[in-house]
Amino acid sequence: MEQLYIDLENYLGIGTDSVPEVVRLAIAVLVLGTIFLLAPILTIWVERKVAARFQNRIGPNRTGPYGLLQSFADVLKLIGKEQIMPAHADRIPFLFAPLLMVVSVIMITAVIPLMPNYIGADLSIGALYFVAIGSLSTIAVVMAGWGSNNKYALLGAFRTVAQLISYEIPLVFSLLVPVLFAGTMSMVGITQAQADLDYWYIFLAPASFLIFLFSNLAEIGRTPFDLLEAESELVAGYQIEYSAMPWGMFMLSEFLHAFLIGPLVAVLFLGGWDGPFAEDVPVLGVVYLVIKSMAVYFLGMWMRATLPRFRIDQLMEFNWKFLVPLSIANLLIASFLWELFPEPAGGGLVDNFPRFIVMGGSSLFTLMVGLEFLRRKSVEDRERIARLIDEKNYPLATADQTGVAGD
Amino acid sequence: MLDVYAPVAPLFILAILVGGIILILSRLMGPSKPHARKVATYESGMRPIGPAVRRLPVQFHRVGMLFILFDIEVIFFIPWALVFRDLGFYGLAVMGVFFYVLLIGLAYEWFAGGLEWEQ
Amino acid sequence: MVKTRENISTKPFSEWEGSIDELKGLVSDKAMTGESMLLNMGPQHPSTHGVLRVVLELEGEEIVTAIPDVGYLHTGIEKNMEAKTYEKSIVMTDRTDYLNPMGNGLVYNLAIEKIINLEVPERAQIIRVILTELTRINSHLVWLGIHGLDLGVTSTMTYCFREREILLDLFELVSGQRMMSTYFRPGGLWRDVPEEFEGAVQFILNIFPQKIDDYEALLTRNPVFIDRTQGIGFMSAEEALAYGLSGPTLRASGINFDIRKVQPYSGYENYDFDVPVGEHGDVYDRYLLRMEEMRQSLRIVEQGLKKLKPGPFRSDNRKYVPPPRAELGRSMEAVIHHFKLWTEGFRPPVGEVYQVIEGPRGELGCYLVSDGSPYPWRVHFRDPSFVHIGALQHMAKNHFLADLVAIIGSIDIVLGGCDR
């Protein structure tokens, strides 16, 4: 933060001492906030274009060059629309839910290290702060669902509670792996540790990386985990009674949150701003971070265009029976192997190669074992269903339940 | 020590300001012509039957219980992970016991059917 | 008086509630006391395929009862047809099941031809088969796209509609209309197919097998898709028969019944094709079966294209079929026939017929009663959508809310056909 302001000052040519601390802070925060508020508008454009290409469409192309101004046009349109308050809504939760959602997501931006020395607040618990503040949106969703006085919204809110709190467990367990490696929860510290080591934690814990990615996709509610707003079942879930800009704020914060998952994953597992010459030319750090974030984001878009949606029981089983045990096992194995194979003194890529093999390999091995277990179980399930159908006593529907088929 | 949190406060204010201004702007700019049909609860075009605000189904309660159990355990892991390097094998052994207890709990939950959605 | 928000919100909630009395006897006692949730899904809902209303009784996410309620798209087509001459009411048939216009036209014309015993030339028969099979593919493509969308795969829809455009262009080529083609007429076709027809069909035959493989690559072995569809919406063979299911929904339950094989019409006995039969009777089997049906339809189209020879495209029975335009200048008799047919219409003999064809959704029947006047006394369509909705309650029992969407998708209903 200070660095950001000092650079700004040098750029503008103002004396450092002439400005009080509060104003400095305010200016720096304003700059940071603007960057992160403009980011989702661009991300929405990217998302729409990429989704369109996946689906053999063109996407927005009329508003501005390449349709770049489409999101601005959408925002303007939404501001001019009528806000409808359902007749029997619970007013306070209904009105404050979008605000809470936006606030919780904007607050996250404080701990994203953009480049060396550029961060809103270098909190010693940065990673935890990210997860904790991010999950405030759960409360916003529940408020929206409860306050709307709508059954679809309520079902959406129920699902949200179940989904978001469940996926928090593997999220935190796999988050602890890089924390354990770096010995700190500070986002700057974790990035710096990876920059010093010349390798990224994804090589040491690829399984944790994947678990973390999936749990995060569930946290932000993207396909295949978009049960909270499943449009084909719950129409739009908790957003159903919202219109105009309150709805727009839900969408804005959702996209911003989705975008911020990229930097978080990049910081924890992909070295954040780390890259060739990033320490000497800090601007490169931003470029690296954006590239890594967009790569992660692209994975999400790809899945969104390809995969069907889970059902609520499958979602829960996937979490509790697969992700949770796997993330615990991974944490255990990672800590054990870290003790067994201490860091070599040199710390270079070559010196660490045996560790990559052992730690990364065992991490991937656990993942494979888990996947094989999952595969066997689902094959077993299918065989069980097929057998029950063959034996004509499938529990879901039998002839005498309705009394029609037996006649 | 709390100095590092200083930028969080203006960011919080900024977030509230941005959110509030957008909401108020939208309220001011947009028309407001409510009538009975428009403000009626959406339920696929039919009049809703029965209240919408009702009890949570029991499955969600169970998920909530599970979450609280595991979340408390996670809290114990965080300090351990932070000082893990200093504790060395001793810390690993102690945490291993904790892991063991946790896994027994999970296994019990699993075999007792607590992780199934349907009872 | 326009009600403002203030005087609405002061009213107690109960005044804005629907009445539960109409559901007495349909839902459980728990729902009557308000313990379990009653939810209207539809008519204005994105995944009820139009305007189907399903009243759900939910325990959490689980469906206790699903009561389908139809009639929101009732347009009085059958009744309207009684006020039009036989030939003029063909245009109404396209509007019933709007994804199967050629099939509806075919069954209605077959019924007319049956009642007046009208011969249809070979060429017209073959073109009818080709176009009806292409309509089946068209309908299955729409089904697949929407089914994918229901399950959350956003991409299938655009892929399927991309290929559907090619088919619609072909229909436009022959009939001048993309969807409401009205191309089949009693005794043959409205006009002969244009020269480009064979090339266009050949183009479809060339590219479609690859496209169908592409859809299968996206879904068939997709684990999430399998988890969402296998063992869902199960119907055993006995139940499927008892509910009167037909078409792919019946065959998925393991019963080999295809009207094209059992009661061939339009010369289907001359084509070599297989009828895919499922074994589990669930949503996944219905999916697999429809994919295979598309391939078999392409086989039929290919054989039809080989058989296509030049020749008359409609019967020369002047009592029922208008003479060619060129004859009007030369023959007084032709002018009289023309005049009679376009002013009064033809008068079939008194009687009643029932004609069935294998539509994309199942057994599509047309019941026609003639009282000897130029207007049909009664036309009734036995639409498979209507029959399948009747089985919805049974299929949806004890499933999750999300499964209901998959089940509605899998029985492939078109409300236009259901409500007529």
Image (cartoon, coloured by chain):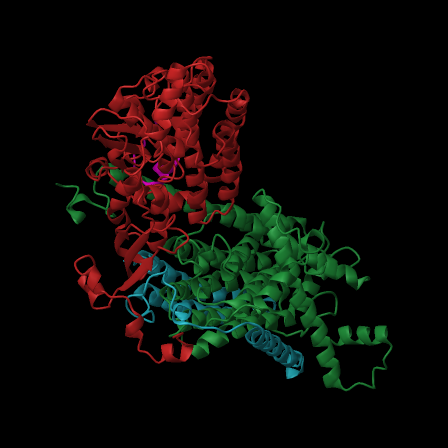
Chain colours: A green, B cyan, C red
Dividing the picture into quadrants, the one containing residue A119 is bottom right
Residue found at x 50% / y 49%: A367
- Is residue C281 at least partly visible in the picture? no
Where in the figure is residue A151, as x and y percent of width and height? 36, 65
Residue found at x 50% / y 71%: A83
Most foreground residue, A271 or A341 = A271
Where in the figure is residue A21, as x and y percent of width and height? 75, 85
Q: Which residues are magenta?
A: C276-288
Where in the figure is residue A51, as x and y percent of width and height? 58, 49
Most foreground residue, A273 or C2 = C2
- Left or right of residue A244: residue C42: left
Name, please, the residue furthest toward the left. A407
Q: Is residue C172 above or below residue A325?
A: above
Q: Is residue A397 above or below residue A7?
A: above
Q: How many marks are shown on the rendered structure?
A: 0
Where in the figure is residue C168, as x and y percent of width and height? 49, 34
- Left or right of residue A23: residue C358: left
Dividing the picture into quadrants, the one containing residue A102 is bottom right
* Residue A161 within the segment the image draws in magenta: no
Quarter holding the N terminus of chain A?
bottom right
Name, please, the residue furthest toward the front. C332
- Left or right of residue B53: residue A174: right
Q: Is residue B16 above or below residue C17?
A: below
Quarter holding the C terminus of chain A?
top left
Most foreground residue, A100 or C318 = C318
- Is residue C311 at least partly visible in the picture? yes
Most foreground residue, C174 or B14 = C174
